[in-house]
Amino acid sequence: MIEEAPLLEDIADGPPGGRAVWVEARDGVRLRVAHWPADAGRGTILLFPGRTEFIEKYGRAARDLGARGYGTLVIDWRGQGLSDRLTGDTATGHVGSFDDYQADVAGMIGAGKALGAPGPWHLLAHSMGGAIGLRAALKGLPVVSCAFSAPMWGIRLRAALRPLAWSIGWASRHVGLGHRYAPSTGPESYVLTAPFETNDLTRDAQMHRHMRAQLTAHPELSLGGPSLHWLFAALQECRRLHALPSPDLPCLTLLGTDERIVDTGRIEGRMARWPGAQLVRIEGALHEPMMDTPETREALWDRLNHFWQAST
């Protein structure tokens, strides 16, 4: 069962014809899913966002994909965007278990079918969405290829802090403090507080202003730091994924050479043992290649288009 949901066209800057719907995950969490169709009928990109992100952030990406003939299906994960928030503090990025995100994937797939999103389907997953997407692909996600942007297959932590993150995250669950913010984080949005000159996301000043303007216009989309429980669950999931083989799918992964958020060693290691997979390094790019300079984005979409055409 789906029902109409708001799509904030005033900030999305997406292609025409977009539609958002509410769907209910199997555990009762209400999720928002959006579909931007395309005329050329080359298929649909299942876009898995990262932590803190929301559907409208990918409106421009959907427009670029539409120009190449692809529709876009994108979700607000539980705990962010306009999907149900999971704690009394709506600024906390929280999840009970990373397995819960697979219930969101199932809801997204159901919505895609109900909305008539045409095949073939391809996965494009960013950051936290890369962990969710890899797990989903291993569980039989109905896609013919998978592409990742700075996937969170490991979290970049200083060696001295890693044991502390594990121990604090584990202990917080047993003393009822798992909902508290992880160390050095709080309710403030990184996009709204990090100056462009020192931000870890994009080299493009105009895109940085656009992302800030989205949250200023619609503060209900904003999300702060992760909870202690989210951090522990994320570290657990990264460890579990590291021990698993790669799915039998064509794969292309995009990684900025100036990445400072996810563990690049984990990405390089998996790509080295994924038969036929391509690791594309983007010179000078930070954590979000899809939000980088116009020249970078144009080359990125062309590269992905070539990959998707070769995968079908």
Image (tube, rainbow, N blue to C red):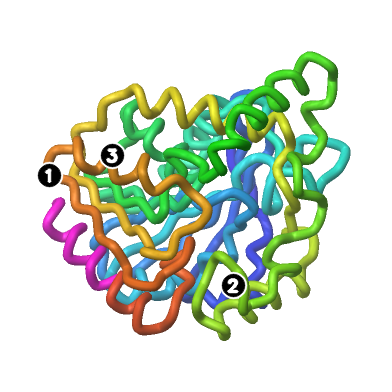
Front in this rendered view, residue 236 or 36: 236
| Amino acid at dot 1 | Gly
Q: Look at mark 2 in the image and give the residue it sits on.
A: 12
**Magenta highlight range:** 301-312
Asked whether residue 309 is drawn in magenta, I would say: yes
Q: Which residue is pictured at 70% across the width and 61% down the height? A: 190
Image quarter for residue 207? bottom right
Residue 238: percent from left, percent from top: 47, 31
Q: Which residue is pictured at 56% across the width and 65% down the height? A: 200
Residue 148: percent from left, percent from top: 35, 51
Q: Quadrant of the N terminus?
A: top right
Q: Which residue is pictured at 26% across the width and 26% down the height? A: 245
Q: Which residue is pictured at 29% across the width and 62% down the height? A: 281
Going by the image, does 308 lie left or right of 100? left
In front: label 2 or label 1: 1
Q: Look at mark 1 in the image and give the residue it sits on.
A: 276
Residue at the farthest front position? 160
Image quarter for residue 189? bottom right
